[in-house]
Image: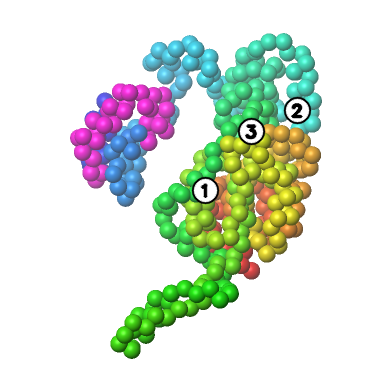
Amino acid sequence: MFLPFFENLRKAGVPVSLREYLTFLEGMKKGLATYDVEAFYYLARVSMVKDERNIDKFDRAFAASFKGLEEITFEQVMEAVDIPADWLEKMAEKYLSPEEKAEIEALGGFDKLMETLRERLKEQEGRHQGGNKWIGTAGTSPFGAYGYNPEGVRIGQKESRHQRAVKVWDKREFKNLDDTVELGTRNIKVALKRLRRWAREGAAMELDLDGTIRATAEHGYLDVKERPERHNAVKVVLFLDVGGSMDPHVKVVEELFSAARAEFKHLEYYYFHNCLYEGVWRDNRRRWDTQIPTHEVLRTYGPDYKCIFVGDASMSPYEIAYPGGANEHWNQEAGQVWLARAREQWASNLWINPVPEKYWDYTHSIGMIREIFDDRMVPMTLSGLEQGMRVLTR
């Protein structure tokens, strides 16, 4: 069934061999991409594309071969394959039309939502599936997992799907960003270099290679020259949003993190989730028991540091504006209070957003963060980074 796909790849100019095609078929046979269109795409690409210059050709051939694949309905899949009942129970998802979603109304604000949750916890005696009231799965209740509600509390679900939860009632594990990732392009480093301000300090000396070559050629003998060592005087404190809606942006944030570690001699970094609150951390594996008080960070690094936040700024507005609105814990002070303190401590500040700029107006919380930062928000593109570096050097 995949022979037309193979032929389309060859016609599109992708130099795919028969051996690579057989590797792809072997992966499919082993079930590496079952019931998952995205996994199927990446399996095919990693198997049959050897050079990144051919990715665009591959994408066109893939689109031509499997047009309409994502339009297959859930009912068609159910009729075509025999899925085990226990798998269905675990992965039950509520598929609703836009009209059905429009009929489900939010409870009327954060305070009302939390009050109703407390009442349900007192009343409910057992597990519940479906429906629109009890804490359960695959329903339209504001409380539970694998369902839909425009404003609810997620309980017992591995990851976000609609990015609509006001609060998450689960302890989740996040991975540290890899600061050794090799950049797909060195242009990110070039953009960051706009922030470098070199200063000659102290008496430390280093070899002046160009001067040594020049003097040796002029004098006819080895004439070693030295010069004062150059120091990168820029100091940066970096706050990185991690987990949840940031998961799709991990790769580009890791590239930025790697570039920053390579470019800035004085770099301190901390993780946070969604918004800055009273605690941050350096290791995501121990974020629940080794948090660092944000007040301590504010006292440690002086106003000569430049402060950069990296995050999608996509969250419930309650997380920014309300005490107790934090996604995973009860915060005594609103997120906007902590962001204001950070901006007051480090006057040279910036927010870098990996969400494409054309979508910013569709997320209310992005507008709130932009307002807090006096519009000092730039997209995570090369031009955006260059613009941000100019903002920080004013």
Quarter occupied by the C terminus: bottom right
Q: Is residue 40 magenta?
A: yes
Q: Quadrant of residue 115?
A: top right
Q: Considering depth in this image, is 175 or 148 the residue closer to the camera?
A: 175
Residue at horizontal 68%, vertical 18%? 135
Pointer 1: residues within 10 angstroms few (<14), some, or many (20+)?
many
Residue at horizontal 38%, vertical 16%? 80
Q: Which residue is mark 2?
A: 113
On the image, the x and y values in percent for residue 81 come to 39, 15
* Disc 1 from disc 2: Cα separation: 34 Å
Of circles 3 and 1, which is in front?
1
Amino acid on which disc 3 is placed: Arg
Direction from residue 318 to residue 39 in the image, left or right? left
Q: How is the image coloured?
A: rainbow
Magenta segment, prevailing SS (helix, strand or loop): helix
Q: Which residue is mark 3?
A: 164
Q: Considering depth in this image, is 309 or 200 the residue closer to the camera?
A: 200
Residue situated furthest bottom in the rendering: 219
Q: Would residue 224 be seen by someone viewing this image from the given angle?
A: yes
On the image, the x and y values in percent for residue 175 come to 54, 38
Q: Considering depth in this image, is 384 or 260 the residue closer to the camera?
A: 260
Direction from residue 283 to residue 6 in the image, left or right? left
Circle 2 sits in a helix, a strand or a loop, which is it? helix
Amino acid on which disc 2 is placed: Leu
* Disc 3 from disc 1: Cα separation: 23 Å
Whichever of labels 3 and 1 marks the residue nearer the N terminus, that label is 3
Magenta stretch: give its range: 13-42
